Image: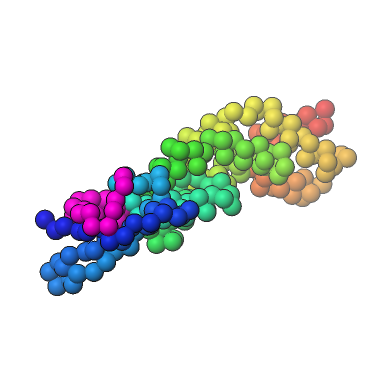
């Protein structure tokens, strides 16, 4: 089994940098590997120059360095906006990380509260309903497109009472119309616009009846 030797170890705000000499392997000449590992991923205690590192430990260091880079990139991505686990994996793939590292990093982000899909979807539903005046169908479509899990979306939408969607739909009609259009074409245009906002035909029909009443 090959033995690797620590050449240098240093600390910085970014983490712990370690330089390891790599023995020759087949046609590959001996060389030096440089790793930057975050403090939270460091698992080697106090290494000193000259310490021997087994091939297995070298592999763990290599993985920890890649994972540390992926985690740093994750925090950078999440500093701009909250995204789903699925979307985070896509972003990390875009930056060139291997699939297993993307999955591992996303799982870590969820487990440590960096990605909070439940809170994010609940906030999104509230925003889409009360600021954009979207109905249930469009909200579900948007959150699905953003990569949230179906069960998370279902729970977030189900937490909003049906009456809340109907109140929002009624407020749209009140803001746009003093009286509802009698002309069939205008009425059809109104219905189509409400369907595009994500309200069902039944919800629209009920809102029109309530408006007339």
Q: Give the position of the N terminus as an image quadrant.
A: bottom left
Q: Quadrant of residue 122?
A: top right
Q: Nearer the viewer, residue 48 or 110?
A: 48
Q: Quadrant of residue 137?
A: top right
| Residue at the spot 57% in from the left edge and 39% down from the top edge | 120
> Along the horizontal axis of the image, is 49 left or right of 171?
left
Tell me where the magenta segment starts and ends, as one range: 45-63
Q: x and y percent of residue 198 in the render?
A: 64, 42
Q: Please check the rendered image and state whether residue 51 is part of the magenta-colored stretch, yes or no.
A: yes
- When the figure is inspected, residue 1 is found, relative to residue 126, above or below; the finding is below
Q: Quadrant of residue 65?
A: bottom left
> Along the horizontal axis of the image, is 94 left or right of 154?
left
Q: Nearer the viewer, residue 108 or 86?
A: 108
> Along the horizontal axis of the image, is 97 left or right of 168?
left
| Residue at the spot 48% in from the left edge and 53% down from the top edge | 13
Q: How many marks?
A: 0
| Residue at the spot 77% in from the left edge and 34% down from the top edge | 170
């Amino acid at each position: 089994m090959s033995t690797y030797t620590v050449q240098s170890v240093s600390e910085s705000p970014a983490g712990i940098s370690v330089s390891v000499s790599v023995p020759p392997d087949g046609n590959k000449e001996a060389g030096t590997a440089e790793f930057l590992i975050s403090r939270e991923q460091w698992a080697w205690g106090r290494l000193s120059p000259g310490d021997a590192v087994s091939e297995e430990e070298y592999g763990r260091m290599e993985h920890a360095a890649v994972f540390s880079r992926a985690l740093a990139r994750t925090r950078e991505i999440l500093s701009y906006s909250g995204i789903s686990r699925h979307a985070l994996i896509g972003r990390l793939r875009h930056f060139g990380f291997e699939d297993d590292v993307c999955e591992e990093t996303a799982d870590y982000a969820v487990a440590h509260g960096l990605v909070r899909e439940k809170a994010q979807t609940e906030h999104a539903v509230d925003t889409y309903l009360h600021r954009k005046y979207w109905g249930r169908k469009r909200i579900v479509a948007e959150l699905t497109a953003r990569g949230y899990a179906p069960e998370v979306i279902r729970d977030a939408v189900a937490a909003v009472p049906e009456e809340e969607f109907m109140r929002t739909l009624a407020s749209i009609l009140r803001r746009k119309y003093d009286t509802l259009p009698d002309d069939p074409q205008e009425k059809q245009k109104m219905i189509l616009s409400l369907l595009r906002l994500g309200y069902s035909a039944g919800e629209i029909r009920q809102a029109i009846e309530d408006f007339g009443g």
